[in-house]
Amino acid sequence: MEPPVPHAPEIRTDTPGSFARAVFHERHPVLIGRLLDALPYGPAQRAALADLLAASTGGARLEPPAAEPPPADAEQWREWGASWWGRRWDEAPFLWAESYFYRRLLDATGYFRPGDPWYGIDPFAPLKAAELAGPAVDGELAALDGHPPTRDALLAAALWGNRADLGFRLTAEDGDTATGLVADDTAALWAHLEHAPGGRIALIADNAGRELLPDLVLLDHLLTSGLAGHADLYVKPQPYFVSDATTADTLAALTRLRTAPGPAAAATGARLWQALTDGTLTLRTHPFFCAPLPYQAMPADLRRELTGATLTLLKGDLNYRRLVGDRHWPATTPFAPLTAHFPTPVAALRTLKSDVVTGLTPATLARLDATGTPWRTSGRHALVQLAAARSTAP
Ligand SMILES: O=P(O)(O)OC[C@H]1O[C@](O)(CO)[C@@H](O)[C@@H]1O
């Protein structure tokens, strides 16, 4: 008999003192302030952003996205929000409410209004551009010219690159340094790829800039080493969660690589450019990557597209929440059964920046709890978790 699928309450924002509540009441006001400093939005947009902040923190009822002119995703959102329209923002699950906040933020700026001068303008672009142009990236690219990095180092760079998410950095404590891995399936991940080299690998990206650059370098390694014969890089179809990578961000990162002064970074950029042009590397997206739903609800077309990949590398905190379900799981709940719905073998590479975690040993959990620190949300810890037992047949 199959073991029962475990269950736990969904994380919500109405719990006083919770991390989820602080995201709405502390992080979002800082974020809106940064956007208003970074771009000369006019009074209408400023008022709309202030209204969004007030509504999402002040007990207002949820309404579908602005209907005039009807946005392309209006129908989709009516469905995604069917259980929540008319309810208070803080009655909706954290995952749903946070995703909808970013959708409404784009509305408020004119992003979806054809004919509006701000139509299609990424409100987070100045923040992302400043990070990509910064000296930290210079240093990281120059480091590629030292000793050739081991594959473990490349994987670790992609993993810890996830700390560089700009939403998290809005309220992260200065001096929060990285510590260690709370679960580490790195060896099993390489063994899995070595078992079936030359297949197709999917990487579902998270943040642009300092996270996407090491992701690209890792993809280059997988392709040049022959561990992958083809790679699909999935990015967001629109700006999301501040620094999530879009196609524009991917092009900016590739350009940063190709034009780096160091030969190793420039050569990596040139190879990836070539891989895109000859189809060895494919850039992909799907509306579901901005859906307020767990991956268990993945639509059939995306499921079909992913099926057959040797491995999906799933980057970041939000993707992890969507993979296992944004729930108050006991941290020792096994990881693999919670991911059995995913269409391919999957490896999560994530720094811990929210309450959800699974697959820890009782000893690790006891050690972390004994620190008395907010280890689940500080971004100082990370994990590599693999669920490999899946059919890889197309
Ligand atoms: O960029 P990531 O790793 O998905 O992190 C998203 C961040 O946003 C949050 O949803 C909170 O805003 C946390 O999960 C995390 O800090």
Image: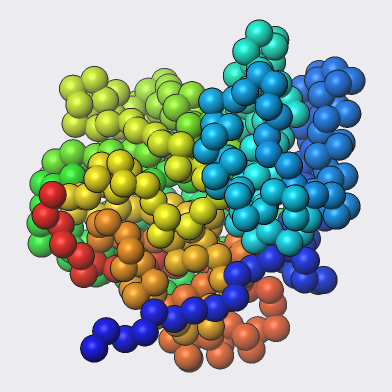
Q: Is 90 on the left or on the right of 388, as rendered? A: right
Q: Quadrant of residue 214?
A: top left
Q: Residue 340: horizontal and vertical position, in percent?
A: 31, 68
| The one of 333 and 96 positioned closer to us in this rendering | 96
> Measuring 62% from the left and 85% from the top, which residue is drawn there?
369
Where, quadrant-wise, is the N terminus in this rendering? bottom left
Whether residue 70 appears in this view of the structure is: yes
The colour scheme used to paint the residues is rainbow
Q: Residue 392: horizontal and vertical position, in percent?
A: 15, 57
Q: Residue 207: horizontal and vertical position, in percent?
A: 52, 42
| The one of 282 and 275 positioned closer to us in this rendering | 282
Q: Quadrant of residue 186?
A: bottom left
> Measuring 14% from the left and 41% from the top, which residue is drawn there?
229
Q: Is 360 on the left or on the right of 171, as rendered? A: left
| The one of 210 and 315 positioned closer to us in this rendering | 315
Whether residue 135 appears in this view of the structure is: no
| The one of 369 and 54 positioned closer to us in this rendering | 54
Q: Eyeballing the image, is 339 above or below 392?
A: below
Q: Is 296 on the left or on the right of 68, as rendered? A: left
Q: Eyeballing the image, is 269 above or below 220?
A: above
Q: Residue 358: horizontal and vertical position, in percent?
A: 47, 75
Q: Is 127 on the left or on the right of 271, as rendered? A: right
Q: Quadrant of residue 218?
A: top left
> Measuring 54% from the left and 44% from the top, which residue is drawn there?
79
Give the total number of marks visible in the rendering: 0
